[in-house]
Amino acid sequence: MLDQVKTDIDSLMAEIGRNARAAARPLAIATTDQKNRALEAMAAEILANREAILAANTIDLANAKESGVAASFIDRLTLTAERIEGIAGAIRDIAALKDPVGDVIAEWDRPNGLHIERVRTPLGVIGVIYESRPNVTADAGALCLKAGNAVILRGGSDSVNSSQAIHSCLVAGLKAAGLPEHAIQYVPVTDRAAVGAMLSGLGGAIDVIVPRGGKSLVARVQSEARVPVFAHLEGLCHIYVDKSADLDMAKRVVVNAKMRRTGVCGSMETLLIDRAVADTHLAPLVEGLVAAGCEVRATEEIRARILNLVPATDADWATEYLDAILSVSLVDGISGAIEHINRWSSAHTEAVIAEDPAVVERFFTEIDSAILLHNASTQFADGGEFGMGGEIGIATGKMHARGPVGVEQLTSFKYRVRGTGQVRP
């Protein structure tokens, strides 16, 4: 029986791969107008079907609560009328972006008269594997379409009803614009074997895999994938508060960075404070976090100054809490902050709160995370906040895509060389 199930899933996934590859060809040459009409129609369908989407989400939420998952997980899974408006708005923002396909990135002439252009092209077929966030269904589908790519979406079992309801709206938008309905496909089974099939590349159908989820999912993808991967393993985000920092600004930024939404990958997980201002800055920052409902885990040095804090261990510096929990340490200025971040960071997002330009310059130069911020919350680590219309995820690797993965990052390039009869001697 198990062998039959595996055979059925393999057959299903092979068909999905073939359909995606066939859809990728007309998508690569689709006009900007066609793609934008599809995106606008998708946004309209999502708004028109909001009640059906909310009803599907209610089922997913009930199942999640019954299984006893964390509050941060529930927050990522939850859809509201306002969030559905945001999903539709994000699709329209993507429609308003410049079409990257065909964009000339660079051009130059050679002494022999050849004119060379480097031009953006679609990647082809993208596989997106994600957990719990139904909005990723819309974000990923819309971004891939704008960049001229077909996409295969495999959401988690926890959000399957919500994601399928959103996906049906995306397909309706494709049909309305005369684009192939298989340009955006949703894997209709929750069996983990479907993930394995995608990681194998579906017989050459998939060009790139983008995982978006927890550490175990991303680690599996990076370990087993037989195609290139755009991924981040986790968001161990830091903020360093320098002795030159404005205290009121620091309090405002730090509380927002941790508590605005604790379950996002841009949420601060470690706060570093310059030891030189421990007497003036430490207590107000910690008290502000505690007042906002955050559990603070601190070094013994800090606990000697502020009572009733949880002891921090080495494991805390390596933990992405995705919850209202934060680890705090004092460091010896910018040098100590750089040393700590370079040891423990996952290369996702870090911020410095400082008025000293020399400190900011060292922070930006000596830390090599994908996103670095000055005097701003780490919660801005988001493609929409970057003006990219949305993102599939934040890539922390150093090849091709890094930081928010938006429409430009979902393209490759080719060279066009124009001559007048030149031959090589």
Image (cartoon, rainbow, N blue to C red):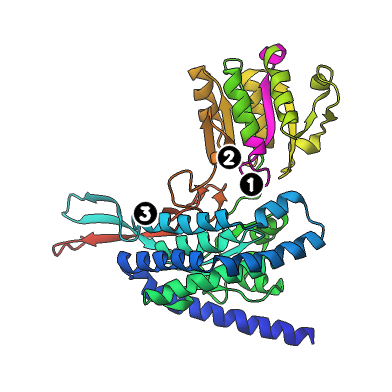
Q: Along the polypeptide, which appears first: circle 2 or circle 1?
A: 1
Q: Is residue 357 above or below residue 295?
A: above
219 displayed left or right of 305: left
Residue 120 lies in what quarter of the image? Answer: bottom left
Query: Residue 97 bears which disc, if any?
Result: 3
Q: Tell which of 357 and 220 is nearer to you.
A: 357
Report, in whole angstroms, how far the alpha carbon at label 2 lies from the one at label 1.
Answer: 8 Å
Q: Which residues are magenta?
A: 257-279
Q: Tell which of 340 and 418 is nearer to you.
A: 340
Q: Tell which of 409 and 91 is nearer to you.
A: 91
The 10 Å Cα crowd at callout 1, few under 14, some 14 to 19, many 20 or more, is some
In the rendered image, residue 311, in percent from the top left (x then y), is placed at 85, 30
Whether pointer 2 and pointer 1 mark residues with C-beta atoms closer than 8 Å, the reply is yes
SS at circle 2: helix
The 10 Å Cα crowd at callout 2, few under 14, some 14 to 19, many 20 or more, is many
Tell how many labels. 3
Amino acid type of the residue tagged 3 in the rendering: Leu
Measuring 37% from the left and 75% from the top, which residue is drawn there?
26
Residue 187 lies in what quarter of the image? Answer: bottom right
SS at circle 3: loop
Residue under numbered circle 2: 379
Mark yes or no: residue 186 visible: yes
Residue under numbered circle 1: 264
